[in-house]
Image (tube, helix red, strand yellow):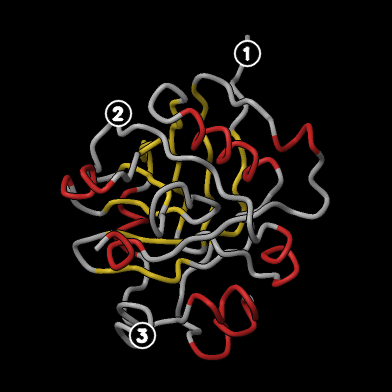
Amino acid sequence: MAAVACQRTRAPEQAAATDSAKSRTAPDTFLVAFQTNKGRIVVQAVRGWAPLGVDRFYELVNDRFYDGVKFFRVLPNFMAQFGVNGDPAVNAAWKDRTIRDDSVAQSNLRGYVTFATGGPDTRTTQLFINKKDNKRLDGMGFAPFARVVEGMDVVDSLYMGYGEGAPNGTGPMQDRIQGEGNSYLNRYFPKLDSVITARVMRLKTD
C-alpha cells in the first residue's frame, strides 16, 4: 500500500559530497524557494517535525540536487512527487544513501511536504507535496517535514495528464528516470513541469 501511495524512492549521495556534508545539521527552521516553470513554491522546513528528513533535505538543497528535476508523478486530488535527478550519474552517486525513519509528528495535510518511501528506513531524495488532506498516510509512517507557505496554486497547476507511473499506469517508469534521467522524460513525457532551481532563502537583516 505504501509503495503504491508514494512508490519506491531511493536517494543516495552525490559523488562530490564529503563526509562532513553528509552529516550536515539543518537549522531549526528555514525556507526553501523552488522556482519552477509554473512559478515559485516556497516551503518552510521545521527540524522538530522530522530531524533526519530535514537534515537530508537541507543537504540536498545546498548541493543543488533538485535543480532541473521533473514533477514526474502528479495525481489529481492526491499529491505531486519529484526528486529524481536529471543526470543519471548524480542518481548513481546517491544510489544507496537511505536514511532512517522519523516519527510522524505532523499529519499529511494539504500543502505538507514528505519524503516518499518504499518501506521502513528507505527515504533518500524523492519528495511529495500533499494536494489534499491525506491523513491515511500518517499510519503508514510518512512523516511530513515541511509545509508550503507560498505557491499552492502553482502545485495545483502542475501537469498531471500522464497519470500514475508504470506499471500501474501509463506515466514514467522510475527505474528509467534513475537510469536515463531527463533525456527519457523529455523524450516520452515532454509536458512534465520542472524545478528550475531550489535554494535556501536568506533572511533579510536590518
Amino acid type assigned to the residue bearing label 1 in the image: Thr
**Front one among 153 and 118:** 118
- Gap between marks 1 and 3, in whole Å? 50 Å
Q: Which residue is mark 1?
A: 205
Q: Which residue is mark 3?
A: 167
As helix, strand or loop, the secondary structure at mark 1 comes to: loop
Q: Which residue is mark 2?
A: 105
User: Which disc, if any, is residue 101?
Assistant: none
What percent of the width, then of the height, locates residue 19?
Answer: 79, 37
| Residue 2, picture quadrant | bottom left
Which residue is at 40% across, 61% downward?
81
Chain-order first, disc 3 or disc 2: 2
**Front one among 102 and 200:** 102
Mark 2 crowdedness (10 Å alpha carbons): few <14, some 14-19, many ≥20: some
As helix, strand or loop, the secondary structure at mark 3 comes to: loop
What percent of the width, then of the height, locates residue 111?
Answer: 29, 44
- Gap between marks 2 and 1, in whole Å? 31 Å
Which residue is at 37% across, 47% downward?
151
Which residue is at 36% across, 72% downward?
159
Tell me the quadrant of the picture where the N terminus can be found. bottom left
